[in-house]
DNA sequence: GCCAACGTTGGC
DNA sequence: GCCAACGTTGGC
């Protein structure tokens, strides 16, 4: 099957690229997604070894801060069953989990390729995350954009 | 803190 | 099924 590419947003105050790097095998479970479209990307589209742009959002300097990969097949997000978690979902049942996630492994920390820099780069206008009003925490990235961004990050 | 944009909920 | 109200995201 064809390899896909993704941009995944994380708030650095929750899980930064450094937090992910410090984790065992530089791998984190992508917990907390509670949007159906983003979930569907993880559940239905992602495959092990898909490319991931690790993006910091809701912070002083939003931007791409690392290259990562999808490191697992989809499985139920454990936080949906944890009543102490802010991601707890009382309507989700163990025999029919509502929220699925994948593990994401950092391949390389990069410089911060900032949002303004992305916006002014010719050729990246169609990057989904740059579209007006976009709020999706996981967006597909076209192969040509992936290649261009990797080149920019050296 | 503001607010545009969008998703979800629930009354009808 | 419609749609107003409400909640959330996320840049600024």
Image (spheres, coloured by chain):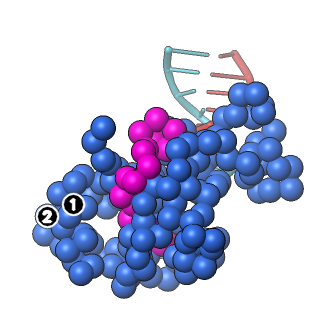
Chain colours: A blue, B red, C cyan
Earlier in the chain: of badge 2 and badge 1, it is 2
Q: Which residue is mark 2?
A: A123
Image location (x, y in percent) of residue A64: 38, 73
| Residue placed most toward the observer, A101 or C9 | A101
Of helix, strand and loop, which one carries label 1?
A: helix
Residue at the extreme right:
A84
Q: Which residue is mark 1?
A: A145
Is residue A128 toward the left or the right of residue A28 in the image?
left
Q: Quadrant of residue A13?
A: bottom right
Magenta highlight range: A39-57
Cα separation between marks 2 and 1: 8 Å
Q: Quadrant of residue A152?
A: bottom left
Q: Is residue A11 visible?
A: no
Image location (x, y in percent) of residue B10: 74, 28
Tag nearer the camera, 2 or 1: 1
Q: In the rendered view, tell whether residue A42 sits above or below residue A30.
A: above
Of helix, strand and loop, which one carries label 2?
A: loop
Q: Which mark is residue A90?
A: none
User: Which residue is drawn at the image coordinates 27% and 79% (left, top)?
Assistant: A153
User: Which residue is drawn at the image coordinates 42% and 71% (left, top)?
Assistant: A107
Q: Do tag 2 and tag 1 residues touch (Cβ < 8 Å)?
A: yes
User: Which residue is drawn at the image coordinates 50% and 64% (left, top)?
Assistant: A105
Is residue A63 toward the left or the right of residue C2 in the image?
left
Indicate yes or no whether the magenta region holds residue A95: no
Label 1 chain ID:
A
User: Which residue is drawn at the image coordinates 42% and 45% (left, top)?
Assistant: A47
The N terminus of chain A, quarter of image: top left
| Residue placed most toward the observer, C4 or A83 | A83
Q: In the rendered view, tell whether residue A61 sits above or below residue A74.
A: below
């Amino acid at each position: 099957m064809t390899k896909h590419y993704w941009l995944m947003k994380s708030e650095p105050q929750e899980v930064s690229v450094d937090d992910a790097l410090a984790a065992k095998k530089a791998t984190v479970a992508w917990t907390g997604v509670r949007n159906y479209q983003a979930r569907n990307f993880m559940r239905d589209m992602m495959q092990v070894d898909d490319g991931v742009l690790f993006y910091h959002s809701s912070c002083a300097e939003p931007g791409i801060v690392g290259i990562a990969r999808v490191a697992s097949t989809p499985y139920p997000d454990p936080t949906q069953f944890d009543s102490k978690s802010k991601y707890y979902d009382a309507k989700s049942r163990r025999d029919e989990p509502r929220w699925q996630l994948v593990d994401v492994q950092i391949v390389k920390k990069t410089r911060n390729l900032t949002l303004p820099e992305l916006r002014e780069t010719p050729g990246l206008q169609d990057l989904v995350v740059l579209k007006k009003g976009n709020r999706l925490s996981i967006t597909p990235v076209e192969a040509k954009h992936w290649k261009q961004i990797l080149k920019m990050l050296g």
